[in-house]
Image (tube, rainbow, N blue to C red):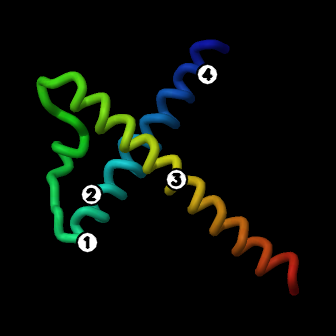
Amino acid sequence: MIILELLLEVIIIGFISNILGKYTRYYFLKIIGRERSVEYLSGNSADQSNRVSHGVLNFLVGVGVLFALLFIVVLIDMYLFHFL
């Protein structure tokens, strides 16, 4: 059971941080004209603090995007199925 919880946590945190957070930051920076590479936003460098700071930023942005997406889905669900 502990292995399953650990595996699920790694998958969810990896999804939030590595997909939602990193690519949201990438496209946002691209839109505002401060384009950075995906490798840079991943924190791939020899500096440990750079890796940690990018990882934390990616996670926080990913959590925000996940909550926003869930909020939009709930609003759509309420509008389509409960207010007819």
Q: Is residue 83 above or below residue 72?
A: below
Image mark count: 4
Q: Is residue 9 above or below residue 38?
A: above
Crowd band around label 3 with a 10 angstrom C-alpha radius: few (<14), some (14–19), many (20+): some
Per the image, the residue denoted by label 3 is 64
x and y percent of residue 4 in the render?
60, 20
Q: State if disc 1 and disc 2 touch (CB < 8 Å).
A: no
Q: Is residue 40 above or below residue 32?
A: above
Amino acid type at image mark 1? Ile
Label of residue 5 in the image: 4
Amino acid type at image mark 2? Tyr
Residue at horizontal 48%, vertical 35%? 13
x and y percent of residue 7 in the render?
52, 23
Amino acid type at image mark 4? Glu
Q: Nearer the viewer, residue 56 or 76?
A: 56
Which of labels 4 and 2 is toward the front? 2
Amino acid type at image mark 3? Gly
Left or right: residue 31 compared with residue 19: left
x and y percent of residue 84 in the render?
87, 86
Could you tell me which secondary element the residue under label 3 belongs to?
A: helix
Could you tell me which secondary element the residue under label 2 belongs to?
A: helix
Per the image, the residue denoted by label 2 is 26
Label of residue 31 in the image: 1
Left or right: residue 72 compared with residue 78: left
Residue at horizontal 61%, vertical 21%? 5
Q: State if disc 4 and disc 1 touch (CB < 8 Å).
A: no
